[in-house]
Amino acid sequence: MDTEPSVRYTPTIKVATIVRVLAIVGYIALYVFLDWLSYIHPVLPVAITPWNPPPGLSLVFLLHFGLRNWPALFVAAFLAEVLVRDIPAPLPWLAFSSCALTGCYATVAALLADKARIGESFDNLRDLTRFLAVILPGALAAALAYVAIFTLAGLVPDAGFFANVLRFWVGDAIGIMVVTPLLLVYGAGNIPRLRGGWRATAEMMLQAVSVLLALWLIFGVELTDEYKFFYLLFLPLIWVAMRHGIQGATVAIAGIQLSLIAILQWSGRSDTEVLEFQLLMATLTVTGLFLGLAVTNRYKVEEQLRHRQTKLNQALRMAAAGEMASAFAHELNQPLSAISNYLRACQTMLTMPDDQRELLCATMDKVVAEAGRAGQVMQRLRDFYRSGTLRLERIALEPLLQGGLEPLIKRAGHHGVALSLKVATGQPEVLVDRIQIETVLHNLVGNAIEASAASKHAKIEVSAVPGENGEVRVCVADNGPGIAPEMANRLFEAFATDKPDGMGLGLAITRSLIDAHKGRLWAEAAPGGGACFCFTLPADYSGVNDHG
Amino acid sequence: MDNNNALVYIVDDDAAGRDSLSLLLRLKGFENRVFTSAEEFLAQYSPAWRGCLLLDIRMAGMNGLALQRELAERGSVLTIVFITAHGDAAKARAALKAGAVDFLEKPLDDRMLLAAVREALDRAIRERNACEARDTLAARLARLTGRERQVLDMVLEGRHNREIAAQLEISPRTVEVYKARMMEKMQARTLPDLMRSVFAAQSRAETIAPTH
């Protein structure tokens, strides 16, 4: 077999370039689409709209993909002018106005990225303050430039100059305030995990309903004055922000804005009325954003506090374990020392000229007694750990495993390890000490994270399937390097470890915990080449419907 | 060197520890007595006891270090070897600083144990000999008259009879007489004999404080 000298074809276009091109094209398309979508209540002939979200999109685009992509802004603005707005001005004027918008918003993006340091994240109150401090003057500058250009072109009467500037400013500013935070919060990789099951879902439904209810009270009921009752919208927004922080607030604000625009459009309001509502909406938006961020920050601080508390508890447990070990060593050393002394004495007797048989026998009895005493110390220790903590409860398998894995999800993510849980349907309840089984999972998954963290596409799969004799079998499989052959035999022995800072007690403790539950623990090679640790737990199928 | 009345005193609150130590040491030729606690030991203690103490550092009630302090206050000459089932560097240092001979950890290594006991007894015997020499010297010194004492001090300083006579303003002949009486009372036949007996007491400065 000869190996051909391979001249490998290296693609001249890199992946990053493709992504960039796609992003630019996508951005331009989305910009034009958004412009078309929000093309309502235009003040003709220059088409100034009361809600203009495309600049918000432009800012996110530049912040995310880099300021060097600014020419895309021009293309998008120009296309929108030509395709959507249909402004009766010669193309050079449209190019000029698009240039002005591009300049304004590229500057705003540069200030946000540089001075305000708003990049991918958007998560504290200072970010928001700086954000507003940059975008409000930025939008005003854009408004002045845009309206001035078309006034010069003779399309806008001089008399309406300031009214048009105000209209443009409000439309762009609120467009940015609604769109940019939303996209920054839900930007790449920031999508928060929604938790809590049906209760949380039900609450979110209720929140949506309450927004609709508020809108109906404001606009649907004839008796109420729309302006006076606008404050009703604050209530559901506060609710959402308090519960879901900035993630909830941005979504709620976008929802309210869209509904508001739809209602105003549908009920055929005058331009002035729409502008007035948009000013109210701006107040609502700023309030919602500040409240949402404040709540998110509070959650974050709470989380940090909890994390620190957990660490402290661990440290305390370690200290208590050290204290125990020390007391235990003392207890065990007493009989060992006596045994050693007695045996040396026996040796001495054997070297003596006269017969010491009787004393020898008596002394050896004492040795046996002391060995028994050492055994009792061990027994006491085992009893302490068992009877002291084994608190059995009947619990369904899936929540048990989920609870055990919950604290590990972050740690796995931190090491770039994907952690998944698969529980076969119809799994029984088990009678276990929840804390001990959580400890077992903590040890096994903790080991798996350490083992696989270095490998590419590291993943850990925790699965539960029915085992033999009505047991359930839980397996923790990783795709790390697997179990070293020289460790395989001593895996479950105490103090056997290949970790530089490990005690070698994890698996030994894990096995004794599983033993205490009358289960078994063993290791095998995972299908993918990593290690797989499995344990069984006695199951109770009485609560499971026998469907197959 | 007679260690006939030098004993090993074992103080350990662990019955098997006590019993096994006692047996092993007896077989190795060290006569010993056992005590179940520091309190029991103190209750029976007599200043006349000679030898060494094998002392468990961690005991219910009065612990080993406290007993060491108490004995030091009572002027005991017993040397101390500490044993412990619980390695504790801080306690070991405290014990050794307070004059313990050694600090052994359970389970005991018998060679180290025997070496420590031997050294402790040796030290105890040396101390006792020094102590006895001091007592003897003190007793002999007490029998000297003022003049004889003065002559002794000067002889120890290496003065000749004539110098002593000049200093004390007596005749050299009289110095001879005082010196002869002094040598007799000190039970020294020659000058080196005298020197040895004084230095053996090891604390010349205390015992033979200048009287002038």
Image: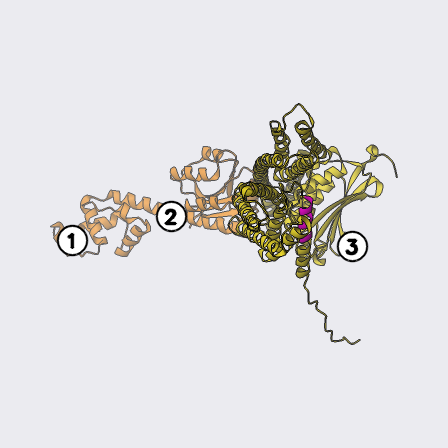
Image quarter where the C terminus of chain A lies is top right
Residue position for label 3? A527
| Number of the front mark, 1 or 3 | 3
Q: Do callouts 1 and 3 point to residues on the same chain?
A: no
Crowding near pointer 2: few (<14 within 10 Å), some, many (20+)?
Answer: some
Which chain did the image draw in yellow?
A
Disc 1, disc 3: CB below 8 Å? no
- Where disc 2 sits, the SS reads helix
- Identify the magenta region: A27-37
- The amino acid sitting under disc 3 is Pro
Q: Position of residue B75 (x, y in %)?
A: 38, 39
| Number of the front mark, 2 or 3 | 3
Residue position for label 1? B164
Would residue B101 appear left or right of A388 to someone viewing this image? left
Image quarter where the N terminus of chain A lies is bottom right
Instruction: Mark 1 or mark 2: name the one nearer the start of the chain.
Output: 2
Residue at the far top in the pictured view: A223
- For residue B129, which numbered disc appears in the image? 2
Magenta-span inclusion, residue B115:
no
Crowding near pointer 3: few (<14 within 10 Å), some, many (20+)?
Answer: few
Give the CA separation, mark 1 to mark 2.
33 Å
Which chain did the image draw in orange?
B
Magenta-span inclusion, residue A36:
yes
* Image height of B27 relative to A432, above or below: below
- The amino acid sitting under disc 2 is Asn
